[in-house]
Image (tube, helix red, strand yellow):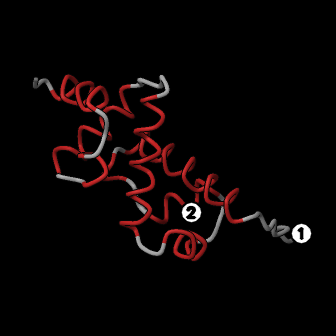
Amino acid sequence: MSKQIVRLKPDVRSDQILSAAIRVVKRNGWDGLIRDRVAEEADCAVGTINNMFDTMEGLRDQVMKRVILLIETGDHCDELIMVVATGLGSGHAEAKKAPRMVKDLALLMMGRD
């Protein structure tokens, strides 16, 4: 029996992919954010990710923005804070734009002030 293709509106699909990417990051860390893993987690084709985010850097930027928003709104799980810490350590532009409170949590996680 073949799998039925479900077509979602672009904003719904984008949210689904970002949620899947965050689950991948929680499990595998920032460096483990790989397009194939995200596609498998989101149950979509790799091409869908390419169409929604253009590049892997585009996906990473959107994931970082979403992670920062989650932390700002109260999700202070260690895995998410480590994503921002890793982003700060690597000079990721979106991580550097994070609010002071989020950066402070990330720096504490890294053991620095």
Quarter holding residue 2? bottom right
Identity, as a three-letter code, of the amino acid under mark 2: Ala
Quarter holding residue 83? top left
- Considering depth in this image, is 29 or 61 the residue closer to the camera? 61
**Residue 75, how many percent across, how many down?**
47, 25
**Residue 32, how many percent across, how many down?**
36, 52
Identity, as a three-letter code, of the amino acid under mark 1: Met
In the image, is residue 60 above or below residue 64?
below
Q: Report the residue at 77% width, 63% height from top.
A: 8
In the image, is residue 77 above or below residue 24?
above
SS at circle 1: loop
| Marks 1 & 2, CB-CB < 8 Å contact | no
- Considering depth in this image, is 48 or 100 the residue closer to the camera? 100
Q: Residue furthest left?
A: 112
Q: Mark 2 points at which residue?
A: 39
Q: Report the residue at 23% width, 26% height from top.
A: 104
Q: Which of marks 1 and 2 is nearer the N terminus?
A: 1
On the rendered structure, is 108 left or right of 79? left
On the rendered structure, is 60 left or right of 14? left
Q: Which residue lies furthest to the right in this view?
A: 1
Q: Disc count in the image? A: 2
Estimate how packed mark 1 is, as few (under 14), some (14 to 19) or many (20 or more) residues with alpha carbons within 10 Å.
Answer: few
SS at circle 2: helix
Q: In which quarter of the image is the C terminus?
A: top left
**Residue 53, how many percent across, how many down?**
50, 69
Q: Mark 1 points at which residue?
A: 1
**Residue 17, how many percent across, how many down?**
58, 56
Alpha carbons under labels 1 and 2: distance apart: 22 Å
Q: Report the residue at 24% width, 53% height from top.
A: 92
Q: In which quarter of the image is the N terminus?
A: bottom right
